[in-house]
Image: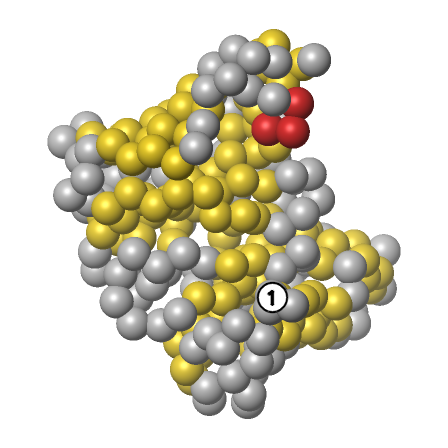
Amino acid sequence: DGGITQSPKYLFRKEGQNVTLSCEQNLNHDAMYWYRQDPGQGLRLIYYSQIVNDFQKGDIAEGYSVSREKKESFPLTVTSAQKNPTAFYLCASSISGGSYIEQFFGPGTRLTVL
Amino acid sequence: SQQGEEDPQALSIQEGENATMNCSYKTSINNLQWYRQNSGRGLVHLILIRSNEREKHSGRLRVTLDTSKKSSSLLITASRAADTASYFCATDAIQGAQKLVFGQGTRLTINP
């Protein structure tokens, strides 16, 4: 089946720890995205990548880091510098180039800082 | 930054009734998209309307776009309990790089 997988589904972190959220897609999409969603809110863009080995900051990149070494994978690291990391994190992908492009989303990872 | 604002924030109706949600945005766009999110899940794309289109249909969904008022509406006809979800509009700004900007969503509850 084609799609996007995120792991783990739930993640608990102690304050001061870095954690890495996994995102993998087998849709052969060039572009991948990470969003943060807080309760009752919309999505805010953290980072996005339009091609392997390249990525750009979104609107709320502080305290986060990413890598894009493979087309299929776009892991997100939540660092200890992120002041309020408890949230629902969503990964998405899309084809690249042109307009009128929909994004396909993974099931999300819920991160809780203890 | 969040460009889209949905109205109302929450909507509760009886099964079989029609549900209308509105979205307003601030800057010129290439297209506007609507997504659905079931509780605790990822988003699912519903429909995309281009900036040069005024209305689009997909099954029980009807989307309108008024670029002069920078607004869009999503109508779900003959609602079902399974339509209970949050609905988000997302805009793709003309100057953007495939970056979608999402609104805060409308939480729709369909009562049986």
Task: Say which residue appears at 71% left-offset and 44% top-offset.
Answer: B40
> Which chain is mark 1 on?
A
Task: Say which residue appears at 79% left-offset and 72% top-offset.
Answer: A17
Residue A41 picture location, percent across and down = 56, 39
Specify the quadrant of the image occupied by residue A75: bottom right
Q: Is A91 located above or below residue A24 in the figure?
A: above
Q: Is B102 located above or below residue A61 in the figure?
A: above
Task: Say which residue appears at 46% left-offset and 86% top-offset.
Answer: A52
Specify the quadrant of the image occupied by residue A15: bottom right
> A79 or B41: nearer the eye?
B41
SS type, badge 1 = loop
Q: Count how many numbered circles sit on residues in the image.
A: 1
Specify the quadrant of the image occupied by residue A55: bottom left
What's the residue type where badge 1 is placed? Answer: Gly
Residue A14 picture location, percent across and down = 84, 64
Q: Is B19 located above or below residue B59 in the figure?
A: above
Q: Is residue A45 visible?
A: yes
Q: Is B102 located above or below residue A84 in the figure?
A: above
Q: Is residue B104 visible?
A: no
Q: Is residue B18 left or right of residue B109?
A: left
> B103 or A72: nearer the eye?
A72
The quarter of the rendered structure image containing the C terminus of chain B is top right
For disc 1, the marked residue is: A3
Q: Is residue B65 left or right of residue A94?
A: left
Residue B29 picture location, percent across and down = 23, 48
> B61 or B84: nearer the eye?
B61
Residue A56 picture location, percent across and down = 41, 74
